[in-house]
Amino acid sequence: MTYERITSERDKDIPYLNTILEMPQISRYISVDKENFWRYVTETENVFYYKVVDEGALVGAIQLELAGEVLYMDIMVIPEFQRRGIGTAIIRDIQNGVLPLSFARIEISIDESNIASIRLFEKMGFRLTSRDDELLLYAYTRRPVWKN
């Protein structure tokens, strides 16, 4: 799997991603203001949006925001590619530092009705830290790397 950062509002895949983001099974959990969203993720410092490509196909996307040592994360796997281990691979790659970001902790918010995502993140070592209305807040803390 490869990760291609979107750095311009003119990226060729944005119209397709907009179509995916409008799908009911996606928009139920991820809501974006298309008028401002792409400018935000391409121009805001410490905000990163990556296309996830597997065997030449666009299979998903991740939005990351770095605040100090905390990495806030949203993952979207395109519905036709779900249940193939892509979400697991993306999370594992981020946990293992595949992207050039330095962080000690990852935090995510999951709608309490999104059982598949809850199971996925718990399987990947995330722990429930709090609840805010219908949102469950999960965190993953990286183990420190000891150097001699």
Image (cartoon, rainbow, N blue to C red):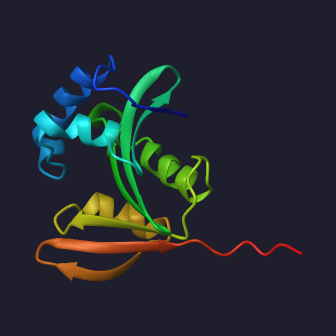
Instruction: Check the image and name the residue furthest to the right.
Output: 148
- In this picture, is 113 found above or below 41? below
Residue 19, by quadrant, is top left
Residue 115 shown left or right of residue 127 in the figure: left
Query: Is residue 38 or residue 76 the one in the foreground?
Result: 38
Whole-percent x, y for residue 89 in the image = 52, 47
Q: Residue at 31% across / 41% down in the picture?
A: 41
Image quarter (top left, top right, bottom left or bottom right) of the C terminus: bottom right
Q: Residue at 45% across / 42% down in the picture?
A: 86
Instruction: Check the image and name the residue furthest to the top.
Output: 12
Count the marks: how many?
0
Instruction: Check the image and name the residue furthest to the bottom.
Output: 130
Whole-percent x, y for residue 10 in the image = 29, 19
Whole-percent x, y for residue 132 in the image = 16, 78
Whole-percent x, y for residue 76 in the image = 31, 44
Residue 9, by quadrant, is top left
Residue 112 shown left or right of residue 84 in the figure: left
Q: Residue at 61% across / 54% down in the picture?
A: 97
Image quarter (top left, top right, bottom left or bottom right) of the N terminus: top right
Q: Residue at 11% across / 34% down in the picture?
A: 35
Query: Is residue 17 or residue 84 the one in the foreground?
Result: 17
